[in-house]
Image (tube, coloured by chain):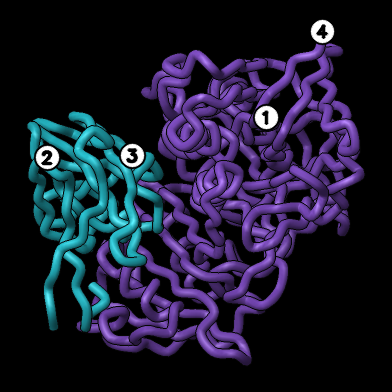
Chain colours: A cyan, B purple
Amino acid sequence: LSQEFVRVADSRLLREGEAVTVDANGREVLLARAAGRVYAVSNLCSHAEGWLEFGTVHVASCEIECPLHQGRFDLQTGAATAEPCIDPIPAYVAYEDDDGIYVETRSGDDA
Amino acid sequence: VTEHFDHLVVGGGFAGGRAIQALTKLAPSARLGLVCAEVLLPYDRTVVSKSLLSGAASTSVAPLVDYSANEALTVYLGDAAVGLDAADHEVTLSSGEKLQYNSLLIATGVRARRLPGDECHYLRTVADAVRLRPSLIPGSRVVIVGGGFIGCEVASAAAAAGARVTILERENALLGAFIGEALGSVVARHLTAQGVEIVTSFDVAAVVRSTVESHDGRRITGDAVVAGIGVETDAAWMPAVCGSSGVQVDSFCATGVADIWAAGDVTSWWSERYQRYVRVQHESSAQQQGLAAARNMAGRRTPFDALPYVWCQLNGLEVWQVGLPGRVAVPEIWTDGAAIVGVTETADGISSAIGINAPERLAAARAVLEGRSRDGLFSGLRRVPETRCQVVPS
């Protein structure tokens, strides 16, 4: 198992309270910004496979709400926080520096 | 007047509404058009048979998203497409307006199949629910034709409102063609406990005034008759892309006719999973396919092959089904006395999974249907013979 980071976006791409999808070494990852911080989770809801990029970022509670059935996930951990979502989605380590936004890429698992 | 759009979406249901939402994000500078036959912006259609029938519910429905935020979007409300000129890239509306497109998404959905005679309620839109609601009052006699998902939900809502409810089902069991007779009988017992009368093997010939007549001469009269007997497609305005079995599309929501895409209930889509065209008319597929079509229209090649998923709320009983049942045979049923989980099988193996009051097992069901794992779906449950599934979930 190895962990490395790949630059996925310019910081200007991601405004406060918004979500976008990026390609992280072939994996579609959702980036969201809440209270200034950047978070990265899987773009696919674990309940009915809705694309979270079209959902709503809840800044105060640091959640992303799925557009299909209003379930929610914690942006930091990927844990399901509102029904009908029960199972977590993968969450990835993300960080931001002067050059842009980076997301971890993991090999050896498909989480 | 002729308007011109980069992306024109015809149909204001789940698929069309989600497509506009996605195009707003993916193609922010594009001119978007949305044609809604109803006088409402796209809304959550599941409320029509779920919450909206309860007398306590407000009859105002919110749009899926704030469509007014997109200034490049033009919406035509209460207007329907009546003609399609695929060669000229032009759609004609019933108002006479002509709309030209660079790319077109057909998301017009389906309409309720009608019974002979015209004294019947059908349930497809908010307007339908608003018309039906005054009949769902204490003492009122409500006759429901069809024991499918819609019929069961209306029965449950009507009984909760104090009405005397009878379901007339053509087959031997409620929901039998979907979840099998044994699990269908679990639903039947739940509804019976709420006072719903269930008449099976009742094959409706016609509705005359408020009397439902069967082919074998039985008659049942109500103050209101509601029919939930399936849907049909309005193909007449778009013969270039649509037949009686819907608009055929490939895995990427494309029709094969230049610059025309389709999504939602109106489509028959090629499934890599099933290696055939499938037709699914549940909200989840419509929403996902609407989003997938928009991604494809915006140049992000995205296959759509979601597992069919339907859910049904019956006042204390919640049913979900993932997959396509096919011909229901040899269902397996597992329970712990509260939750019930079942699977339907075909010659190819497990074709669908069903949960009754088992929301936490939905992800495990998806894993089974995707061939990943059988662990989790039945854990902690015991298998019961199909014929002895007498569990009444608590």
Q: Chain of mark 1?
A: B
The three-letter code of the residue at mark 3 reads Gly
Q: Tell me the crowding category of disc 4: few under 14, some 14 to 19, or many 20 or more residues within 10 angstroms, Cα based.
A: few
Of pointers 1 and 4, the one earlier in the residue sequence:
4
Q: CA distance from mark 2 to mark 4?
A: 47 Å
Residue B174 at x, y percent in the picture:
58, 62
Q: CA distance from mark 1 to mark 4?
A: 16 Å
Q: Is residue B283 visible?
A: no
For residue A51, the mark is: none
Residue at mark 3: A55
Q: Outermost residue toward the top?
A: B1
When the figure is inspected, residue A70 is found, relative to residue B61, above or below; the finding is below
The three-letter code of the residue at mark 2 reads Cys
Q: Residue at x 38, y 68 (%)?
A: B355
Dot 4: what SS?
A: loop
For residue A62, the mark is: 2
Dot 2: what SS?
A: loop
In contact (CB < 8 Å): disc 1 and disc 2:
no
In contact (CB < 8 Å): disc 2 and disc 3:
no
Q: Residue at x 9, y 33 (%)?
A: A36
Q: Residue at x 47, y 65 (%)?
A: B321
Dot 1: what SS?
A: strand
Q: Nearer the viewer, mark 1 or mark 2?
A: 1
Dot 3: what SS?
A: loop
